[in-house]
Amino acid sequence: MPDAVVIGAGPNGLVAANVLLDAGWSVEVLEAQEEPGGAVRSDRGVHPDYVSDVFSAFYPLAAASPVLARLDLAAEGLRWSHAPSVLAHPLRDGRCAVLERRVQDTCAGLAEFAGADGEAWEDMYRTWARVGPDLVQALFTPFPPVRSGLRLAARLRASGGLRLARKLALPVRRLGEEEFRGEGGRLLLAGNALHADLAPEAAGSGGFGWLMSMLGQSHGFPVPVGGSGALTAALVSRLRRRGGALRCGERVAAVVVRGGTAVGVRTGGGETVGARRAVLADTSAQALYRDLVGEEHLPSRLLRDLEHFHWDFATFKLDWALTGRVPWTAPQAAGAGTVHVADGVDGLTRFAAQIAAGQVPDEPFTLFGQMTTADPTRSPAGTESAWAYTHLPQHITSDAGPDRITGRWDAREQEAMADRIEAQVERIAPGFRSLIRARRILAPTTLQAMDENLHNGAINNGTTALHQQAIFRPTPGTGRPETPVKGLYLASAAAHPGGGVHGAPGANAARAALRRHGLHALLHRAQRV
């Protein structure tokens, strides 16, 4: 019997298992899919000559994560690669906002939109340089972040205190208008905010857009050499080298609870796997509480709160094997790993408003990834392994476009949505469609079937909005991984600090389990004295 059972071999589950192994625990990880990785997987499913990232692709949060840094995955063979430029937002008139690897180059580009905007970006980055490291440390530790929080508070006071806090609480549209005279800086901030489900007018979207933009400036948007699966392979290699067990194709059907304590799990095949000390769940909050634990073991208030759980946007994704590089009308976009496709901040606002109304956007904001540009191993020289995704309502009420998409996602609807995304790219990269050698469509229902944590394609396991962060994640409480069942811990992005590939929810859950048993050991020794 292992000390701990981890449900799910996504990045958070694998991080949790590694942290426990480092503390000397024995660990068994059970994964329902036939391969590990969750939303960190790559394959050659689009074309045998092209490596495609099936889900996530660029990892600024992983690059900044102190959690992953402590695991030293380079020792397991993980290597990172960067595109020449981090991110670009081309416009139809040929102008292009570019987040470059060097801050001086970003500033020079933004100054072409408005003369003083280069200085404004540099000032923003100087603030990040002062507070960023402590902010990241505070974000990636259990809530409340006492020691890192105190350091951060001191840094914030030295960097403007309440005025900086006000800026980060602003909607990203307002933050961009206050900081920049031209459109370039505003585009970078607003596009990055919409990597999550934060509309340009949402409170706090300025802080998220600033965070992602500054992470991109300081750490880039790196990719694992050889595909995102290389990150998973490194975590699995480390786990096995330290004696951990991983079993794929083993669906957990229930958490076994006795006397209010989690003592193991039962698989779909009827096997009971006991756990001497803890069960950690890299699952959605709903799946854990409603499906695996059961209402009889949970307080009624938690069950009522779950009824108000807010999922983030649905996602529709395309993967392509392209015979050549994308012919962007703005040449600066050619060297960027990530390209944002939208008609300015107003286009982003319109897109988000349609989603809020339950409509399928007629001109969807598209995040486009040029993977061979970022990592030349992904496809033959002169070609491009590419992808794009857009967001959709969780519940579709109508289609703002002409295709009558309802959310059934049959073959007709999938093809219509794919064509709509490609048309958006074609508008600012004429000839793009002629380069398509093969494509793969991943509708929201397909994404969920491949990773159950991606509820209808929700990539962050719950909204990034302020009402479901920190002490409100996943429901109002402590913002910690402990659950009402002793020995059971929520180790997924449904827990603080939320989505993104950084490993913090898994590490937080593992440390919570270790603290509990460390305290029990101390009490036991004290009783014997």
Image (cartoon, rainbow, N blue to C red):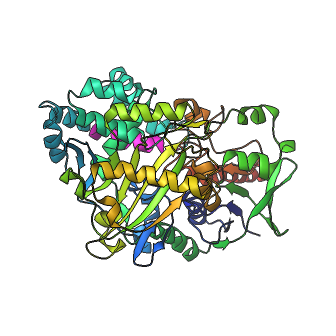
**Does residue 112 appear to the left or right of 463 in the view shown?**
left
Q: Is residue 134 magenta?
A: yes
Question: Which is more toward the observer, 413 or 225?
Answer: 413
Residue 339 placement (x, y as % from top left) = 32, 51
Image spot of residue 116 (x, y percent): 14, 30
Residue shown at 88% from the left, 49% from the top: 259
Vertical arrangement, residue 151 with respect to residue 492, above or below? above
* Residue 212: quadrant of the picture: top left
The number of numbered discs placed on residues in the rendered structure image is: 0
Residue drawn at the location 82% of the way across and 33% of the way down: 300
Q: Nearer the viewer, residue 518 or 157?
A: 157
Quarter of the figure that contains the N terminus? bottom right
Image location (x, y in percent) of residue 372: 32, 67
The magenta-colored residue range is 127-141
User: Relative to 207, is 459 on the left or the right?
Assistant: right
* Magenta stretch: dominant secondary structure: helix
